[in-house]
Every structure is written in structure tokens, then in C-alpha cells.
Amino acid sequence: MFGYIILFILNNFFGISIDLVSFILVGMGAFLAGIHSIPITAILMIFELTRDYSFILPLMMSVIISSLVMHVIFKKSIYLSQIDSEFDYSTYNPISKALDNIFVRDLSLKSCTIVRENETLESLMKKFIENKTSHLYLIDSNNKIIGIIFENEVKSLLFELNNLNNVLVAKDLSNPLKISVLENDKLANAFHLMNRFGMNELLVVDSKNQYHLGTISYSDVQKQLSLEYFKNDLTRNISSEFSKIKSHSKVNVFDDYFISEIKIPDSFIGKSLSQLGFREKFRLEVILIKKEIIESDNITNTKILESDPKYVFNENDSLVVFGKKKFIDLLDFHIND
């Protein structure tokens, strides 16, 4: 509508004759490139709609100007600006509460398919086919990821492969990588980003030097969320049966998964679960914490606490852990070693 108003003013008040359709299409391309920060995609999409070479030059100029204005004024994508302004990390819903104490680094990261800036169009197509992926990550000479290349954009050039193979390289087809997560980010934040932008995968980068570490998928986060819900249900059910679990005994829950009470070693005293990196190191879930309190009359009372990553262990504390038998045995070996 705004573009049509400008066109009406130019045609009727300044005597400039401009084709309505061309003006609207150029405006569409500029708007798309600016809002989404995808200049190459915007040009290709508008061209595919028309197959008309006559307005390619003004389209390219408008897209470049639009992208530059966005980068100079806003510094980053409008989508990320909305996240910063709208997402309240202090507002807990059941999902964010379940994932808030888990970090991205706790998941098993998958390797990502990378390409160099000067790789040819033919090389990109081969990597898409061989790796069966929908996108490739572009790295610079310092091995830092600087962009992303989508399969559908490369496929659109398939029929022009002979003409474009020595003209276009990976850098020309890449889009800015606007969304990624750090290894120390909370999994709740990653899950929110995936849902907000409809992403099935997120790139994980090192918090110190921004090198790529791998990717996490939406299914990985969902599995972890299911495990957290199961653990919470198990915590509620086991609280009343806690007295039946003897120290260092193992209660079979299903298959190879057991519950066991473990008395903490001296090396745990004065540290929290997060400081110990317990989940990452031992591959076990802490369900409950058993705290023994000695009253003034030397009477010992036992207090059962829910798992809290920030709880600092004291002498005589015990943990009720859940996981595979082999990992419980490894924890026993570590404590008794």
C-alpha cells in the first residue's frame, strides 16, 4: 500500500511514468530482504515470479540499500530484537521450568556440515546429496561460521549449473546466520527459539571464541523434556516410598534403569550439582536430596529436598539418583575409589 501511494504521487504530481507492477515487485524484494536479512533469496524469489530481466538491476539496488539500512540502523535482525524485548525469562511455564536447570552442553551435540567460502555450486550440490541435509554452514578462513546455505536455494539453480558453476561460489549463496545458541545457554531458551522461528535445528557455538561445536535438534530437546517430566513424576511417586530405599542399594524401575541412594563423598561437600557438573560427568539424574539435620539435643532429623542444581552439599547428605545401572556403578566406583 505504501509503495502504491509513492507511485501514485510520482506519476500524478511529478510527471514521472513508472510501471505499477515493476515498482511493486521491486518494493516487495526490498521489503523481504530488509526484514528477513536474505538479499540473495529475495532477488531469486522475485525473479522466479516474473522471469523478467528488465528490472533486475533496480531490484538488486533496492535490495542492497534495504539490507544496508537494516544492518546500519538495527544492527541485527528484527526477529532477534523482538526476542530481546518480548521474551521474559523470569516468566516460568511448565516447559521452561522443566528445562531451566539444563544447559545446551548437557545434550549430545551432532556434527554440522560445513563448506568453505570459495566452494563451487557443484560442490555444494554434492554435499547436500551426500549428507542428506537441508542446509550447509559457511565458515571463513578462521573456521568460524559466518552464514548458512539452504538446499532449496541451491536447487533453484540446478538447471543453470553449467553456466553458473564457475560464477557463483558458496559465499555468494549464503545467508546471514542470525540465530544460534551458546553451549552455556539454558535449554529452555533454545526450545523457545526453535518454536518461535519453526526451526528443527540450532547451531551451538563456543562461548569463548564463537567456534562451532555442533547442533541440537528439536527432537533432542523433546526427548530431554520427556525425561524431565518422567523424572518429576518419579520424584512425586517415590517421596512416600523413600524409606524403602537403602543406601547403595538399587531398585529396578524398568529395563536397565535403576534408582539408588548414594551417600556423597567428602569431595562433594561445599559444592553444588551445577559446580560439580554432575549430570554431564556421571550421566545420572538426581531425583531427591536427603539432608540430615542434627538438632540441639543430638536428635537427627531427615529432610527430603527436591533436586536443586544450586543446593550446596553438607556433610552426611545423600542423593537419590536415577539412570542406567552401569552409570550408577561408575558413580559408586568414583565415590569408593
Image (spheres, grey):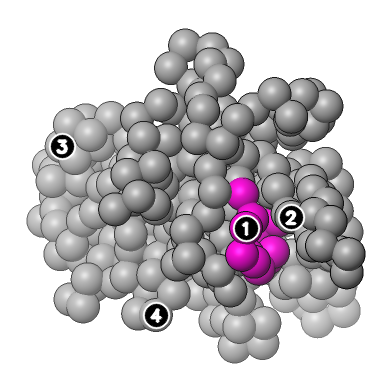
Q: Are marks 2 and 1 in contact (CB under 8 Å)?
A: yes
Real-space Cα separation, disc 3 to disc 1, in angstroms = 60 Å
Image quarter hosting the N terminus: bottom right
Select label 4 or label 2 by which is in front: 2
Q: Are marks 4 and 1 in contact (CB under 8 Å)?
A: no
Q: Which residues are magenta?
A: 308-318
Closer-to-camera residue (205/92)? 92
Q: Residue at x 59, y 88 (%)?
A: 72
Q: Considering the numbered disc 2 on the image, is that residue within a helix, a strand or a loop?
A: strand
Instruction: Characterize the local packing of mark 1: few (<14), some (14-19) or many (20 or more) Cα atoms within 10 angstroms.
Output: some
The vertical placement of 173 against 93, above or below, is: below
Whether residue 135 appears in this view of the structure is: no
Q: Which residue is mark 2?
A: 292
Q: Are marks 3 and 1 in contact (CB under 8 Å)?
A: no
Q: Considering the numbered disc 3 on the image, is that residue within a helix, a strand or a loop?
A: helix
In the image: residue 280, left or right of residue 34: left
In the image: residue 188, left or right of residue 293: left
Q: Which mark is residue 316?
A: 1
Whether residue 132 appears in this view of the structure is: yes
* Mark with earlier residue (4, 2): 4
* Mark with earlier residue (2, 1): 2
Q: Amino acid at mark 1?
A: Asn
Q: Which mark is residue 208?
A: 4
Q: Which residue is mark 3?
A: 126
Q: Amino acid at mark 2?
A: Glu
Q: Residue at x 29, y 61 (%)?
A: 138
Real-space Cα separation, disc 2 to disc 1, in angstroms = 6 Å
Whether 70 is among the magenta residues is: no
Q: Considering the numbered disc 4 on the image, is that residue within a helix, a strand or a loop?
A: loop
Select label 2 or label 3 by which is in front: 2
Q: Main secondary structure of the magenta part?
A: loop
Real-space Cα separation, disc 4 to disc 3, in angstroms = 33 Å
